[in-house]
Amino acid sequence: MLMRRPVVVGVDGSPASLVAAEHAARAAVRRSAPLHLVHGYLHALGYGVPLNPYDMGIPAPSESAEKMLAATVADLAGRWPGLEIEARQVAGGPGATLVEESRHADLVVVGSRGLGGFTGLLLGSVGTQVAGHARCPVLVVRPTDEQLPAEGQPPGGGRIHVDGPVLVGVDGSESAELALAYAADEAARRGTTLVLAHVAPPDEGTPDDSAVLLDSAEAAARATHPDLVIGRQVWRADRPEQALVDASGEVALVVVGSRGHGGVAGLLLGSVSQALVQHSRCPVLVAHPYGHEA
């Protein structure tokens, strides 16, 4: 029997991470996969190595974190009784821990900001590290104020918006093709519309060029999901990332490739995916291939 890959979510007790745990639970139910809650409890800069070179011991898991994980498990199990949930603390930096977990995961989910995040950044250092280095797809969750649970409360108090279409950018790149495949799968799981979007420069190309790209993308999506409802959008804009950020307020999920046309091999995320994970108004799925080396 093949081992099922879990959905993994990083949890640190912050309101944003608890909303991420709820998104992860929904994703696990859609995939019929187990859910793993992981708390990396060493300082993020330590990457699992003691910061003091004279202190070679690794701290023990904390009792407060154990209680936080137990409360989160109880809340999620109460709302999804059939969901298989595992929770554990790992002696490692939160980002490095989730990257390592991604090697054996079907999906990794991170909140937009955890404890100690800088308020000027939508995605903190942990989320940035995971979105750039993970070995599987990454769901970046940016909760709205109404979705955040009150301090000390489980995630169930917030309202998670799961209705609405799945949007994916189409540009003919290999990375966009992978994003399209993931987006079609996600739309099918959710029973919603898949929207194919192409952003063309205002002064280049013709409508026929966009039509050819969208025709090819639609054919690829229907090859695996023939009954999927598919919509199409063409926008003219100088910056495709801004057009997609603007559109993210009208959809339930945006799926992006890790790199698009013109990507530099040394960059972990292209400009479009960087903009979306930092500024999207809805969750963003970064379409890393399974087992890739960043």
Image: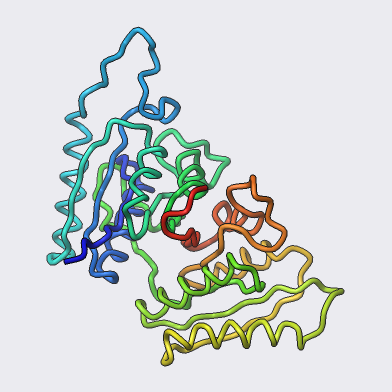
- Residue occupying the point 58% across, 55% down: 279
- Colour basis: rainbow
User: So how many labels did they put on this image?
Assistant: 0
Q: Residue furthest right?
A: 203
Position of 211 compared to 284: left or right?
A: right
Q: Residue furthest top?
A: 54
Task: Identify whether 52 is placed above or below 129.
Answer: above
Task: Identify whether 131 is placed above or below 80.
Answer: above
Q: Position of residue 40 (x, y in %)?
A: 31, 36
Q: Is the N terminus in the top left, top right, bottom left or bottom right quadrant?
A: bottom left
Task: Identify whether 199 is placed above or below 88.
Answer: below
- Residue occupying the point 38% across, 81% down: 188
**Residue situated in front as seen by the camera: 122 or 40:** 40
Q: Residue furthest bottom?
A: 227
Q: Residue furthest front?
A: 1
Q: Position of residue 206 (x, y in %)?
A: 81, 84
Position of 278 compared to 55: left or right?
A: right
The quadrant where residue 209 appears:
bottom right
Task: Identify whether 289 is placed above or below 12.
Answer: below
- Residue occupying the point 35% across, 7% down: 54
Q: Position of residue 72 (x, y in %)?
A: 21, 49
Q: Position of residue 189 (x, y in %)?
A: 35, 77
- Residue occupying the point 28% across, 54% down: 155
